[in-house]
Image: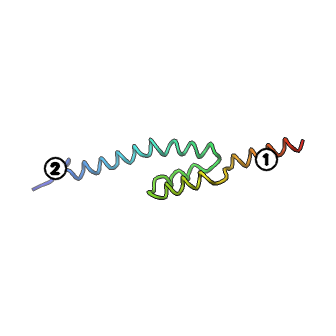
Amino acid sequence: MQATSWDLRSLLSFGFWFAFLFWIIILLIPIFRILKRTGHSPVWSLLFVIPLVNVLALWVFAFKRWPVDQTQQRVDMTAVSQ
C-alpha cells in the first residue's frame, strides 16, 4: 500500500509544528517582554520551552533579586542621604 502525501504521519507532524508555534506565540512573547521589563535578558525566556526547566526557572525568577529592585534601592538610598 502506497502512502499518500496526506497520510496520518504528515497530519501528526503538521499538528506538532502548529502546536509548537502556537506555544511560542502565546507564551514566549509575553515572557520575553516581562523579562525585558524587569531588567533581565529576554533570552532567558527560552528556558520556558524545556519541560521541568521551565518550572525551575519560574521559581528562580520569583525569588531572586531583580535588577530593577537594585536600581530602586540605589534611588532610595540617594534620597535618604540628601
Q: Position of residue 8 (x, y in %)?
A: 20, 50
Residue 25, numbered circle: none
The residue at which mark 2 appears reads as 4
Q: Position of residue 1 (x, y in %)?
A: 9, 56
Name the residue: 79% across, 47% down: 74
Separation of residues labelled 2 and 1 (CA atoms) = 66 Å
Residue 57 or 8: which is nearer the viewer? 57
Name the residue: 76% across, 47% down: 73
> Is 3 on the left or on the right of 73, as rendered?
left
Instruction: Give the number of marks.
Output: 2
Q: Residues within 10 Å of mark 1 (few under 14, many from 20)?
A: few
How did the renderer colour the structure?
A: rainbow
Q: Which quadrant is home to the C terminus? A: top right
Q: Contact, CB < 8 Å: mark 2 with mark 1? A: no
Query: Label 2 is placed on what type of residue?
Result: Thr
Query: Label 1 is placed on what type of residue?
Result: Arg
Query: For the view shown, which residue lies furthest in the left direction?
Result: 1
> Is 8 on the left or on the right of 58, as rendered?
left
Residue 77 or 23: which is nearer the viewer? 77
Instruction: For mark 2, give the secondary structure.
Output: loop
Instruction: For mark 1, give the secondary structure.
Output: helix
Q: Nearer the viewer, mark 2 or mark 1?
A: 1
Q: Residues within 10 Å of mark 2 (few under 14, many from 20)?
A: few
Name the residue: 57% across, 48% down: 42
> Is 17 on the left or on the right of 72, as rendered?
left
Of the image marks 2 and 1, the number of the one nearer the N terminus: 2
The residue at which mark 1 appears reads as 74
